[in-house]
Amino acid sequence: MPLLTDAELVERHLKGDTQAFNALLTRYTGPLYRFVLRLCGESNIAEDLVQETCVKAWRKLSSFQTERSFKSWIFTIARNTTFDYLKKKKTIPFSTLDEQSPIEEAFQDRIEDERPLPPELLERDDRAQLLETALKELPEKTRTILLLHEGEDLTFQEIAETVQEPLNTVKSRYRRALLSLRTIVDRLLGESAPK
């Protein structure tokens, strides 16, 4: 199938072309998964939520308005599906998810990896972990805007459609997110510096 726009694929699907929706899924499943994973933090849950997003998109595709951006439309569905899941899950405090029992900690302390890692891999992993920790401290709406723009390359207009907020609000939250992120990273680096 030649490279078609999202709107063309939607139109083909609505006319009965079963491959058109598969092409849309192929195009967006990876970006949706990355986005949802960064919101929920669990790969198995992210897979389920992306699958649920795709089913919802398939069911609602006949009501999709082709003058809208399909990308922002499907990311809206993913965002809402993920937030619905997180609201239901809120009864479990996030801080307890990372805690291990003393037995698990003792067991992990005894496992040694014989292979040394190059220092640059450790440093890159530390930076990625630091950024993930800092991102989790941002409010959900702010984090969502940052992840959609930086992680999934959505334009501010597409993000405004996705989060259903005015364009200037999205731009303002994005700027504040960057400033907050810098402050959080500086604080975390200060906390981890040797005393």
Image (cartoon, rainbow, N blue to C red):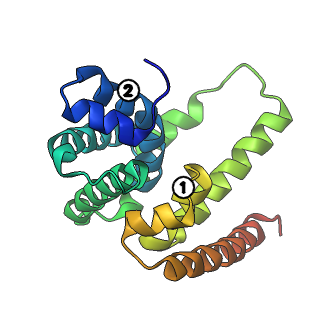
Q: Nearer the viewer, residue 12 or 156?
A: 12
Q: Of helix, strand and loop, which one carries label 1? A: loop
User: Where is residue 153 drawn, in percent x and y?
Assistant: 59, 51
Residue 23: mark: 2
For disc 2, the neighbor class at 10 Å (few under 14, some 14 to 19, many from 20) is some
Q: Position of residue 16 (x, y in %)?
A: 18, 26
Label 2 – label 1 distance at C-alpha: 19 Å
Q: Are marks 2 and 1 in contact (CB under 8 Å)?
A: no
**Residue 79 at x, y = what percent?**
34, 57
- Going 37% across and 42% down the picture, which residue do you hit? 7
Q: Does 168 sit above or below residue 178? A: below
> Quick check: 80 left or right of 100?
left
Q: Count residues near mark 1 (Cα–Cα under 10 Å), then give few for <14, some for 14-19, many for 20+.
A: some
Q: Quadrant of the N terminus?
A: top left
The residue carrying mark 1 is: 154
Q: Is residue 129 visible?
A: yes
Question: What type is the residue that disc 2 sits on?
Answer: Ala
Residue depicted at 39% across the width and 62% down the height: 162
